[in-house]
Amino acid sequence: MTERPTVFSGMQPSGDLHLGNLLGALRPWVLEQHLFHNYFCVVDLHALTVPQDPLALAAKTRELAALYIASGIDPDSSTLLVQSHVSEHSELAWILGCFTPMGWLERMTQYKDKTRHSAQERISSGLFTYPVLMAADILLYRTNFVTVGEDQRQHLELTRNLATRFNHLMGDVFVIPEPRIGQLGGGARVMSLEDPASKMSKSDDSDWGVIALLDPPDRIRAKFRRAKTDSGSSVDMEAPSPGVANLLDIYRALTGCSQDALTSEFQGIGYGQLKDKVADQVIAALEPIQRRYRDLTADPVGLDAILARGAEAARGVASATLREVRSRIGLLPPSGSGPL
Ligand code: ATP
Ligand code: LTN
């Protein structure tokens, strides 16, 4: 039997998970889970790149793990882990950082976007080296594919370049991973309901543009009713404005319907009706996730046991990769761990 390719992916336990995270990442993970050997990670060390309240971070870490499972990740067939539980991530990140030219990090658009309005003194160096830790996450597991939203493409490119550079300088150690982005068609990038020119984002200042996965149904409906469309009143499928196109994309991503079916359902209908139909689909998709989430969080001990099991399994693979890296670059093995 041939080995299934490895997928590694992760999300930060900061802010509330939203519909963009679900359609851009979580749902593709779940739908393709049976095709791959999977690692799904709660990247708590990445969350530290901006200030966090300690108690809230711990709670968010459990919450995110529960949302992974509630959304359909099966912890018996996929490895579910918390990044900081496997210290190899931090160690490899340091080593890789020493192989990363500053210029590569200076070109990262996410870093530039996130720091544009901040004074230099307030930006942590962790935010700058964020993509190196992400590369370490991925490379530790000899990952073949990384399933993420479009906005992570540049980070993936840096991971590939870094792995290629290391292999070239030190001999082949790393598998070069490939991005797996927007394989499901529409919905690869969900836009804010308030400002359809920017992506739906956890760090959005206003809550009205963002559908949180744990929002109650009436709040979801209210947010869709307020969603920005345009000065028209009914759907023109030939040339929908960005706000309308975003609503149609969400509908298509959730129902999996074809473009023809979408056109016959929505051509010429009023914006009010469009918004209600999309809200209905979102509410129906989130209801079972919210129910399972409540059950899981009622048993934090059970959840922690799942995470302990995941860390144990991950450590086995991660430590083997790190051992090889250490040996290639000339770090002396600790006594008792055998000859170089
Ligand atoms: P922040 O705005 O604080 O950067 P975020 O909402 O972008 O947070 P992340 O934790 O950075 O969320 O992203 C987790 C995953 O969700 C990534 O794979 C990312 O590509 C995907 N993702 C995030 N926002 C969207 C979106 N609006 N549409 C599609 N995918 C998204
Ligand atoms: N930067 C990613 C989160 C992340 C990640 C990873 C995704 C950290 N490490 C490894 C895939 C693989 C984001 O989605 N914001």
Image: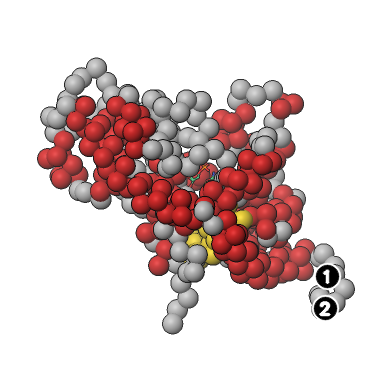
- Residue 57, image x, y percentages: 63, 43
Residue at image position (50%, 29%) is: 204
Q: Closer to the camera, 297 or 254?
A: 297
What is the x, y in percent for residue 65?
53, 53
Q: How crowded is mark 2: few (under 14 residues within 10 Å), some or many (20 or more)?
A: few
The foreground one among 305 and 3 is 305
User: On the image, which quarter does residue 51 sit in?
Assistant: top right
Q: Is 306 placed left or right of 323 in the picture?
A: left
Which amino acid, by three-letter code, is at mark 1? Answer: Pro
Helix, strand, or loop for circle 2?
Answer: loop
Which corner quadrant of the image does residue 270 belong to?
top left
Foreground of the two, 16 or 324? 16
Disc on res. 339: 2
Q: Are the residues tagged 1 and 2 within 8 Å (C-beta)?
A: yes
Residue 29 seen in this snapshot? no
Distance in Å between CA atoms under marks 1 and 2: 8 Å
Q: Which amino acid does label 2 sit on?
A: Pro
Residue hosting label 1:
333
Report the residue that reaches farthest toward the front.
Answer: 298
